[in-house]
Image (spheres, rainbow, N blue to C red):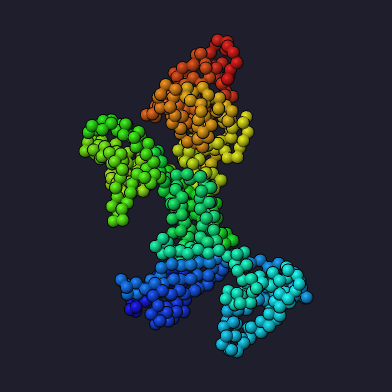
Amino acid sequence: MSEQEMQDLLDDLASRGFDDHQLRLDIDRNEAYGLPRFSISREKEFGEERMYYKLNFQWFESSLGYELTSIHANHRMPVDIDPIIVNGINSNDLDREMGEVNWLKYWESQLKDGPANEAMEIVPHCIDGLAQLLLSESLQAKFTGESLMYKHWPLEVFSKFSDEPKRMGRLFEHDYSFDMKEYPNMTAQLAFLIISERSDAIQMHINDLGASQIPESAIKIETSKMLKNLPDKTDLKFSFSDQQHFATLSVPVFLDKGWYNLEGYTLALAQLPEIKHGNFNGVDSERLDKKFSTVNWREDKDIAFTEKNAEVWFPRDIELLQEELFRMTFDQEGKEVADLLMLKHWLCAPIFEDFISERAKERLLSLPIKAAQFSSAIQVDKAIGLLSGRPVWKELFTDQQIGIWQRLVTPTDGRPAELETFEAISKRELSSLFDMIPVPQHKKDTVLQHLMKGIEVEVQANNGQMIRIEISEDADGLKILNSKGQQIPFNFHLDPNWGPNLHQDLNPKASFKDAQSISNKTSSNKPRGRSL
């Protein structure tokens, strides 16, 4: 290899966490032999855990040089030593003394018959202590001696002295090979995070936040990218979209006793504009919108295919939808509606996001954004409801008779939004209200769960009309809207004198607790039957 190619290889290894001065010598030695493939072993400690790496290189004629093709990583978990005393040998003291010795240098000096270092004068005492444990008739003592050798000695040396070297490996080790084609950004630290299951742990923390719109693959990519160098703290950032909002999620994570943890997150939310449908250049935009809604643009892997030459092709039904959408753009008013359809359905959708027009992207950037910080106890789906101005049911509150809700309150003095807890409609009352709406009941439980999360629910009424239901701003009733967002007044309290004009608010916001007093104020007739 040329000097430049060697330096490029060393720089690549350094970026992956392998940058000791011996690397150049090891590569030069193997290159001198003219080997087509060779491996170099390295070892790193992460607190009480240890990683063994085998860096595999291959010669490529195309580049006339060696390239790193894979990293085989072996993770050793912490080895806990049982506290025992055998023949005056205290295992905890022996563990501490052996930890003070550089055993790699000691065994290298033994092979070279070099003079013993003064710092290694304690070695005979350690070896004598090991012998006392290994020669004991106690199985526990023998295992403790094996554990001490395994913990402190180089793996090759331990394998020569141990009666069952593979036993310790089965108890404390697991490994994995990372091919550079599949893991091009693999580093020593990232391999440690993956094999030690730390990356899985932080991904579980993210999943526990309840951001159901973020795919697993996006979480994996972001954690690998931001944690590959094992920072003490960093922010994991995600973008996601549904048919109503575009959101960005920022999650600060930090190392806590060697594991990544989180305490909260910041959610920023932009409400996508309502679409004013019409017929543009022969395309009914509302009908097209409904067709688009039947496709899972963000997760369905069978709606776009990428060839080896990076060319993308689509099934015929997807092509027809695209053609209708782009036909709308030739109409001046249809162009704006088409932009909003793109934002509604293609934001954060792999491949299709690239087809969003620059006009639509500029429109997205101009939208007002609401943002707030939340603790990890509040799931992202609920935080979306809170930022949308709707109250949510307080987590872990199970009383059916009392309703405890939360909402965001923005102080007038410019301080950040605060979470307010208040009492309002109970689960039982909410269920009774829903029973009065002329909609199918088979999805009642699911709809109620969404409403309590502050999510607006679209359902089909018994007459076939699509309506939207949401919790009122004060969580004291339900609001019903048509598909265009217009409020539909509804007499939830079955008051014979009820009428929209008799109330300042057209929404059914009168709570069950106040139903009797409202009825008395608006009617002089004696109520018949029991009030709800």
Q: Is residue 111 above or below residue 79?
A: below
Percent position (x, y) of residue 357?
Answer: 28, 45
Q: Quadrant of the C terminus?
A: top right
Percent position (x, y) of residue 146?
Answer: 66, 72
> Quick check: can you spot residue 308?
yes
Question: In the image as oriented, which residue stretches furthest toward the top?
Answer: 525
Name the residue located 44 percent from the left edge and 18 percent from the top edge: 501
Percent position (x, y) of residue 489?
Answer: 44, 22
Name the residue located 61 percent from the left edge and 77 percent from the top edge: 160
Residue nearest the observer in this picture, 257 or 43: 43
Q: In which quarter of the image is the N terminus?
A: bottom left
Quadrant assignment, res 282: top left
Name the residue located 27 percent from the left edge and 38 percent from the top edge: 320
> Quick check: can you spot residue 412?
no
Residue nearest the observer in this picture, 384 or 407: 384
Name the residue located 22 percent from the left edge and 36 percent from the top edge: 331
Q: Is residue 56 above or below residue 517?
A: below
Residue nearest the observer in this picture, 465 or 263: 465
